[in-house]
């Protein structure tokens, strides 16, 4: 069995906690990520996907719960040296390739920033050579090192963001909607690059997105979020073939296909949370309906889903 790299236990991220305008952006979610895999995290805008990623990497201090990385609780009390080690092991690729790069810095210094912080090069020549190597790794040229971010296209800027994340040789990368700001023609290039780098370097990804077709292409398993809750988690193929939660079914029904006949007859399912008709005191939790396929449901729904899944076999 694959080794766990990251364990999320009852993670909560509330804003304005205890006030009338409290926002439960991430509300008591738990899941694991295994070494070498890509876990996709999907859901509509505002469901808590990006907040989950930012809480994992400590851009936000979690309201409650644990993030255990390599056996260590990320949100426990940490010294500066502990945080430095953690920050080297875990990196993030941000959604907006325009806003995530300092416009006043040359590419050489942007990519080398992590090298400088962690003291990974001995002199200016080694620093420059390492940046050139990283640029070539992500499909750019070493001549690009002397340019500024505004001189690049959106796809090239995202490649710069990937090079910056790779500079410190991380084990785990959170890719926060890394293709949403890019043209469709460029999206596949960036995703293919991420897959190639994963194979070469043994990387582990949390891939956050709302493009379900692209998430299926890159992910080993997929988690679905709705209003701060994780409502379904399953292997990618299983989730698409046999979505069990009504919200997941709603999302998948909205995916267009390049087939005019299918599109003419496609019926989009809507999701109404009230349709669950939960009773007072009924416990709603993540339950394993089939091996590796978890659904956020009541005991009553769980028994019904088990029967339905057994009938499909």
Image: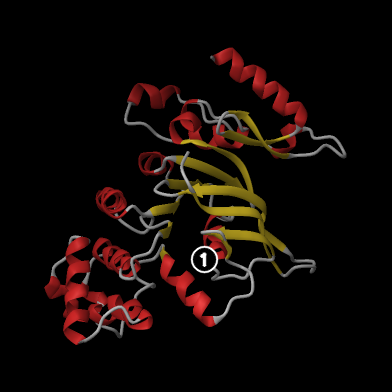
To which quarter of the image does residue 183 belong?
bottom left
- Report the colour scheme: secondary structure
| Residue in view at x 66 percent, y 24 percent | 305
Is the residue 298 above or below the residue 27 in the image? above
**Label 1 crowding class (10 Å Cα cut-off): few <14, some 14-19, many 20+?**
many
Of the pair 24 and 108, the residue shown nearer to us: 108
Drawn side of residue 26 relative to residue 2, left or right: right
Which type of secondary structure does the marked residue at label 1 adopt? Answer: loop
Tell me how many marks there are.
1
Query: Percent position (x, y) of residue 64?
Result: 70, 63
Is the residue 212 above or below the residue 111 in the image? above
Query: Percent position (x, y) of residue 313?
Result: 53, 14
State whether residue 147 appears in this view: no
To which quarter of the image does residue 270 belong?
top right
* Residue ID for mark 1: 57
Of the pair 122 and 302, the residue shown nearer to us: 122
Of the pair 233 and 269, the residue shown nearer to us: 233
Is the residue 308 above or below the residue 246 in the image? above
State whether residue 29 appears in this view: yes
Query: In the orientation shown, which residue stands out farthest toward the right?
Result: 280
| Residue in view at x 57 percent, y 66 percent | 74
Query: Percent position (x, y) of residue 22?
Result: 74, 65
Drawn side of residue 298 relative to residue 199, left or right: right
Query: Percent position (x, y) of residue 38?
Result: 42, 47
| Residue in view at x 51 percent, y 75 percent | 83
Is the residue 170 above or below the residue 36 in the image? below
């Amino acid at each position: 069995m694959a080794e766990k790299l990251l364990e999320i236990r009852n993670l909560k991220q509330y804003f304005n906690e205890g006030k009338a305008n409290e926002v439960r952006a991430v509300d008591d979610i738990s899941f694991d990520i295994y070494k070498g895999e890509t876990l996709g995290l999907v859901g509509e805008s505002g469901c808590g996907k990006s907040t989950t990623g930012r809480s994992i990497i400590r851009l936000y201090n979690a309201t409650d719960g644990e993030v255990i990385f390599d056996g260590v609780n990320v949100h426990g009390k940490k010294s500066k040296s502990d945080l430095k080690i953690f920050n080297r092991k875990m990196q993030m690729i941000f959604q907006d390739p325009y806003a995530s790069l300092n416009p006043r810095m040359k590419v050489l210094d942007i990519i080398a920033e992590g090298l400088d912080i962690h003291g990974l090069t001995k002199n200016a020549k080694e620093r420059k050579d390492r940046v050139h190597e990283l640029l070539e790794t992500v499909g750019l040229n070493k001549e690009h090192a002397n340019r500024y971010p505004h001189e690049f296209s959106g796809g090239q800027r995202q490649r710069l963001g990937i090079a910056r994340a790779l500079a410190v040789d991380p084990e785990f990368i959170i890719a926060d909607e890394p293709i949403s700001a890019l043209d469709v023609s460029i999206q596949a290039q960036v995703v293919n690059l991420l897959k190639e780098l994963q194979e070469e370097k043994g990387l582990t990804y949390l891939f956050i997105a709302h493009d379900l077709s692209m998430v299926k292409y890159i992910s080993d398993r997929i988690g679905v979020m709705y209003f701060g809750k994780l409502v379904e988690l399953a292997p990618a193929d299983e989730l698409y073939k046999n979505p069990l939660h009504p919200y997941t079914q709603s999302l998948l029904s909205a995916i267009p296909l390049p087939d005019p006949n299918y599109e003419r007859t496609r019926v989009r399912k809507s999701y109404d949370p009230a349709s669950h008709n939960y009773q007072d005191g009924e416990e709603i939790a993540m339950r394993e309906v089939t091996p590796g396929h978890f659904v956020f449901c009541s005991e009553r729904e769980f028994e019904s889903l088990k029967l339905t899944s057994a009938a499909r076999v």
